[in-house]
Structure formats: C-alpha cells, structure tokens
Image (cartoon, rainbow, N blue to C red):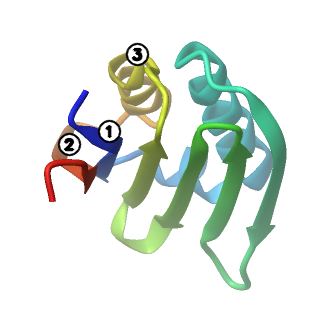
Amino acid sequence: MNHLGIQHIVEFYRCSRSIISDGKQVEKVTLEAARLANATIIESIFHKFSPQGISGVILIAESHLTIHTWPEHCYAAVDFFSCGVLDHKAAIAHMQKEFEAVKRSIETFKRGDLKE
C-alpha cells in the first residue's frame, strides 16, 4: 500500500425521512455498518438536533465514521476514514439499504501518499 489510509465521502439521497430523523435508528444503523466493515469500535456519540437532524461520530481504532442527516431534505452525509483494511463496501451498502436511500454518490480518496 502506497498510502496511509482511505477516505470515502458518501452522500445518500431520497432517504426515508422517518428513519434518518430517529436518533436511535441512525445510531443503530451506523454502528452496525462499522461492525460489518470489521472496524474496531472505541466509542460513539450521537446527537439529535431540534427541530431535526442527527450528527454522529464513531471513533474506531482505524480512524472514524461520521454521519450527519438532514431529514427535511431526505439526505444523509457520511465520512468513513480508515488506515486499516476494512470492508467499506459492506458498510456503505448496509447504510443505503437501512436508510432506504434511492441514490448514493461516493468519492474515494487515498490519504497520506507515501511516495511524497
């Protein structure tokens, strides 16, 4: 590997408004995604905003998984960064399915180029 880590910026569109409005559900799905990726979960914190929206951070030994939801737009944004070999595809597919997202986009970046 010629880099220190990989980062996936994921956007989920046309999600179920009721699911991404529910703080407990967003936390459950995001933690399940981390487990499906075989990440080593250290700690997580999720916050529900008033009147709407959820932000969450899962600190993993390999780096982090974050989510922010905008239920009023049926949209969720995810940042999944890791320095280890994780199953990002399984995690992202799980989140898309559980949030009932009709569309997603993924940008992937190699971080820490070791050739520099």
- Residue highlighted by disc 1: 101
**Considering the image in quadrants, where does the C terminus appear?**
bottom left
Classify 10 Å Cα crowding around label 1: few (below 14), some (14-19), many (20 and above): many
Circle nearer the N terminus (3, 1): 3
* Image spot of residue 25 (x, y percent): 71, 40
The Cα–Cα distance between marks 3 and 1, rounded to whole angstroms, is 15 Å
User: Above or below — where is 1 with respect to 58?
Assistant: above
Q: Is residue 13 visible?
A: no
Q: Secondary structure at mark 2?
A: strand
User: Above or below — where is 23 with respect to 36?
Assistant: below
Residue type, numbered disc 3: Ala
Residue at the image position 64 percent from the left and 66 percent from the top: 54
- Residue highlighted by disc 2: 104
Circle nearer the N terminus (2, 3): 3
* Image spot of residue 21 (x, y percent): 62, 58
**CB of mark 2 within 8 Å of CB of mark 3?**
no
Q: Which label is found at residue 90?
A: 3
The Cα–Cα distance between marks 2 and 3, rounded to whole angstroms, is 14 Å
**CB of mark 2 within 8 Å of CB of mark 1?**
yes
Q: Is residue 16 left or right of residue 104?
A: right
**Considering the image in quadrants, where does the N terminus appear?**
top left
Which label lies toward us, 3 or 1?
3
